[in-house]
Image: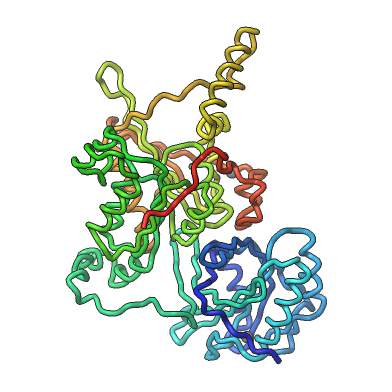
Amino acid sequence: MKEILLQRDGREGLWRIRADDKQKLLRLLFHRYPEREWGTFFRFGFRRTAWGILLAYVDMLVPEPGDLDRRSGIVEFRPGYIQRALTSFDDHPLGIGMIHSHPEGCGVLPSMTDDDMDSYFSEEFERFSAGRPYASIIVAKNEDGELRFSGRLFDRGEWFELTTALTVGAELLREQSATGRRFTTRGEETANGRILERVAQLLGPQTPQKLRNAAVGVVGASGTGSPALNVLARSRIGKIVVVDPGQAKDSNHQRNLAMRFSDLNAGPKPYKVALARRMIEEINPEVGVRSFVGDVLDDMVLDELLRCDVVLGCSDSNYARAALGDIAAQYLVPVIDLAVQMRAEEGVLREQLSEIAYYAPGSPCPWCCNRVTAGAIRYETSTEGEREFMANAAAEAERRGVDGAQYWGGTPPPELTVGYLTTMLGAMGAGYAQTLILGAGTIPHQRFQFDVGLPSFALAEDVREPNKECSCQRLIGWADQAKADRSVSKPAHWPSPFEIP
Ligand SMILES: [Zn+2]
Ligand SMILES: [Zn+2]
């Protein structure tokens, strides 16, 4: 018999799963409840991060008749089922874990039998999979019928705790392991507690706690990003991850809510995330902020975005939109993507468009929605030299009488937006993020546009069917194991990211 000791070195596991997959899984696990246990092997995508391991649920290796011992009250995996799991490692790059239920009143602490099973599986699975991590999860219900879980991960010779479960569906659910550290803080009687008094009256007494436990990522910290951050800081969201590679320009002042008049005279110009951080801390110093001068394509940034309940896309570039689509599908991180477009003719506004898209795992990605193009991504990720080379190649092709667009689609016009529209849309995005976290509502359409200058705002829903061949459908939850199918990787000439403390 082996006792399993968990490492307490700060490494932790985080488990993400889609709501409909979770429902299917729990139906199977609890079908002999309340007296008897049941279990299954499952496949997961994973990523080793700076803080531990992200585990994204893919599917069950559904137990077939004879795979588990039905006569036993506890879950017993028969050799044939174990063999099937072991040989499947040759067919996919994913990890395999085990999940089982405990009978009513037994809690979710691993039993001695569980320790034996996990010792055996972790060693066998590691050997057969050439070093992929192993996960073991236990679920049960408490006296009130609420779901509880505990979990542990084995990776490179060490066991550590699976502390957090994030369920992604119409509602975003964050749950802590029943055996883990407790994050719940009691007492809202401080002055700060009164900040959310009215919000709690509107949406229920759980609201402040849910917001405090949540984390939101914001990619892009200027026009739509800064108002989103302002709203999030005021809502007392517990943690914010903000990412932007750029420095502020004077022309940003009219739409960047984090910028002061005195910043205009600053030289060198401050980083946008430094301004965002200053604004957040002035509004609410209790928010835990991680601010990165970097990009959604950077590994250290991705590590932190993966811990967020939801990510707001506020950068309005093709490559970032494509990358966020990959993150949504492959890591099960839902993304609310925001974009504005304004156009005028001779001083008269013709377009004041806003777009909101919700990229959740399983829904059509930006490629399936025709929202990004390879040409635009190529332009955004090229060096000046490459752009010149492509433009010359296009001109040369035109001279030969061939369409040059395959080499060069032309330089995109500068983005002209005004602060009132970006502020409105950024605030809306932050509002939807909170709505999803609180389970207080949903985003009305997967993707929609409206124009504030037109009757009834000319609201238009964009309904798309996902392309079944697209990686957003084939590789849901494959995490780092889907790397070869990423839309875009970081160009070598882009600078290294760093964090502003
Ligand atoms: Zn057990
Ligand atoms: Zn797709």
Viewer-closest of 304 and 300: 300
Q: Residue furthest front?
A: 267
| Residue at x 61% of width, y 45% of height | 486
Asked if 476 appears above or below 1 in the picture, the reply is: above
| Residue at x 65% of width, y 86% of height | 114
Q: Is residue 369 left or right of residue 116?
A: left
| Residue at x 78% of width, y 75% of height | 82
Viewer-closest of 341 and 4: 4
Query: Does the rendering let one see residue 466?
Result: no
Snapshot quadrant of residue 476:
bottom right
Q: Quadrant of ligand 1?
A: bottom right
Residue 437 pos. (x, y %) = 39, 62
Q: Quadrant of the C terminus?
A: bottom left
Asked if 367 appears above or below 234 in the picture, the reply is: above
Viewer-closest of 236 and 456: 236
Residue 388 pos. (x, y %) = 54, 21
Residue 323 pos. (x, y %) = 53, 45
| Residue at x 45% of width, y 58% of height | 170
What colour scheme governs how the chains and residues are painted in the rendered image of this protein?
rainbow
Residue 259 pos. (x, y %) = 25, 43
Q: Is residue 160 left or right of residue 91?
A: left
Q: Is residue 180 left or right of residue 124?
A: left
Viewer-closest of 445 and 273: 273
Q: Quadrant of the N terminus?
A: bottom right
Query: Does the rendering let one see residue 130?
Result: yes
How many marks the image carries: the answer is 0
Snapshot quadrant of residue 237:
bottom left
Q: Is residue 35 left or right of residue 286?
A: right
